[in-house]
Image (tube, helix red, strand yellow):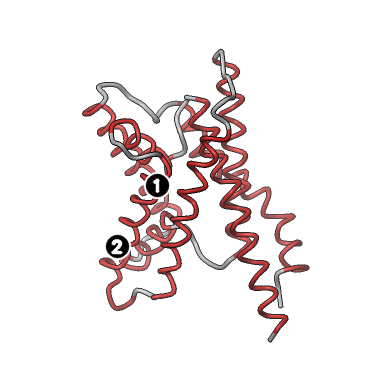
Amino acid sequence: MKTVQKHLLRRYLLLCIGLVIMAFGVAFSIKGGLGTSPISSLPYVLSLFTPLTVGTATIAMHITLILLQILLLRRNYELIQLIQLPVALVFGTLTDGAVWAIQGIAVQGYAARWLVCAVGILLVGVGVSFEVTAGVVTLAGEGMVLAVCRAFGTPFPKTKVGFDVTLVAIASVLSLLFLHRLEGVREGTVAAAILVGMVAKQVNRPMQRFSRRFLEA
């Protein structure tokens, strides 16, 4: 029993490390100014024309996604998935902390922006891999995709693409309506949509060995 608890503690510790890495990935993508990842585009745009910080807007979006999951699945909703709520609170807080921590970094020139954007993509991909390897709870974004798949029988890859496109579209519309310009959605957003999954896939290989050695009871 103690061994199981020890391995579970390690899984949650790995999840927390993954959340920290992802939070810094989001912060670097914002600092790069070439567009954030699709999942962060809406909170970032909201933070530009409301009193909300990026982290607070992230929490609000995740809470909305959790409520949508409950509405979609109803009786089939598993209460254990409510763990997504405290995870969202932690992730949002970490995101604001990461944005504050790198605020002093100066980025000048298009090449430098791409470098910072690439760091953000790399960190988000590594963080996603840590989250997946931990295997204890998903963030609300992925939980929403899984809920749609379960409710409508759609394949995960296509549903994930549709979800990302929807977030980017909403962010773009809100940006044009309230800021009268396009913010948070640029070439870096496209790069993140393509490359984050590829980075996570590469990191998953050594992480699988790590999981077998340290996380499996």
- Mark 1 Cα-neighbour bin, 10 Å: few <14, some 14–19, many ≥20: many
Q: Decide if residue 119 is on the left or right side of residue 160.
A: right
Q: Position of residue 200 (x, y in %)?
A: 61, 48
Q: Residue furthest bottom?
A: 1
Dot 2 amino acid type: Leu
Return the residue at label 1: 58
Residue for point 68% across, 80% down:
4
Where is residue 137 drawn, in percent x and y? 51, 65
Quadrant location of the C terminus in the rendered image? bottom right
- Which residue of the protein is positioned furthest toward the top in this rendering? 109
Viewport quadrant of the N terminus? bottom right
Q: Earlier in the sequence, mark 1 or mark 2?
A: 1
Residue 14 lies in quadrant = bottom right
* Rendering coords of residue 11 (x, y %): 64, 66
Task: Name the element at disc 2.
Answer: helix
Give the percent coordinates (x, y) of residue 174: 26, 34
Task: Measure the alpha-carbon separation of dots 1 and 2.
Answer: 14 Å
- In the rendered view, would you say 146 is above or below 107? below
Look at 30% across and 70% down and name the residue there: 73
Residue nearer the viewer, 1 or 41: 1
Picture layout, residue 75 above or below residue 14 = below
Amino acid type of the residue tagged 1 in the rendering: Thr
Residue in the foreground of this view, choosing between 86 and 193: 86
Look at discs 1 and 2 and give the one toward the viewer. Answer: 1
In the rendered image, the residue lying farthest to the left is 177
Q: Kindly state the secondary structure of the residue where label 1 is placed.
A: helix
Q: Residue at x 35, y 66 (%)?
A: 153
Q: Which residue is mark 2?
A: 67
